[in-house]
Amino acid sequence: MATDYDSPRKTDDDLGEDSLQELQARRMDKSSSTIDLDPDDAAEGLELPGADLSNEELSFRVIPRQADEFTCSRCFLVHHRSQLAEESKGQLICRECAA
């Protein structure tokens, strides 16, 4: 519901003067503002997990590992050198895996 912040605000006295019929009419207006959706239209844009994506083509640029990056030997993710926690027997381990 949109609110007009420039309109004058009701005081406590004004709120007490609202009739019972006005309050009931407002309640009925709010309850009648529900939105009915056609189930066929709503499900049209949804994709289920495990859907066949064999016809889809992905295009993105692969950037090789930089000199200041390393590949964690546990999670196999490429991290910046600042994320290096330990190096044991030539195996580089990131902070997340070392924790």
Image (tube, rainbow, N blue to C red):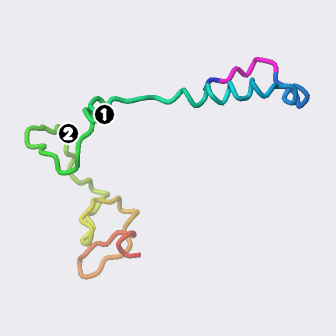
The C terminus, quarter of image: bottom left
Q: Residue at x 27, y 38 (%)?
A: 46
Residue 98 vs residue 28: left or right? left
Q: For residue 40, which quarter of the picture?
A: top left
Please identify the dominant SS of the magenta region: loop
Q: Residue at x 16, y 46 (%)?
A: 51
Q: Where is mark 1, residue-wise? A: 39
Is the residue 11 above or below the residue 56 in the image?
above
- Of residue 5 and residue 94, the one placed in the foreground of this image is 5
Is the residue 71 above or below the residue 32 in the image?
below
Query: What is the magenta range?
Result: 3-8
Give the percent coordinates (x, y) of residue 84. 36, 68
Q: Amino acid at mark 1?
A: Pro
Q: Amino acid at mark 2?
A: Phe
Give the percent coordinates (x, y) of residue 58. 16, 39
Q: Residue furthest right?
A: 13
SS label for mark 1 = helix
Give the percent coordinates (x, y) of residue 26. 68, 26
Is the residue 89 above or below the residue 68 in the image?
below
Mark nearer the viewer, 1 or 2: 1
Q: Residue furthest top?
A: 7
Tag shown at residue 72: none
Q: Residue at x 35, y 58 (%)?
A: 80
Q: Where is mark 2, residue-wise? A: 60
Q: Badge 2: how crowded within 10 Å, few (<14), some, or many (20+)?
A: few
Proximity of marks 1 and 2: CB atoms separated by less than 8 Å: no
Would residue 4 be counted in the magenta stretch?
yes
The N terminus, quarter of image: top right
Mark 1 vs 2, N-terminal side:
1
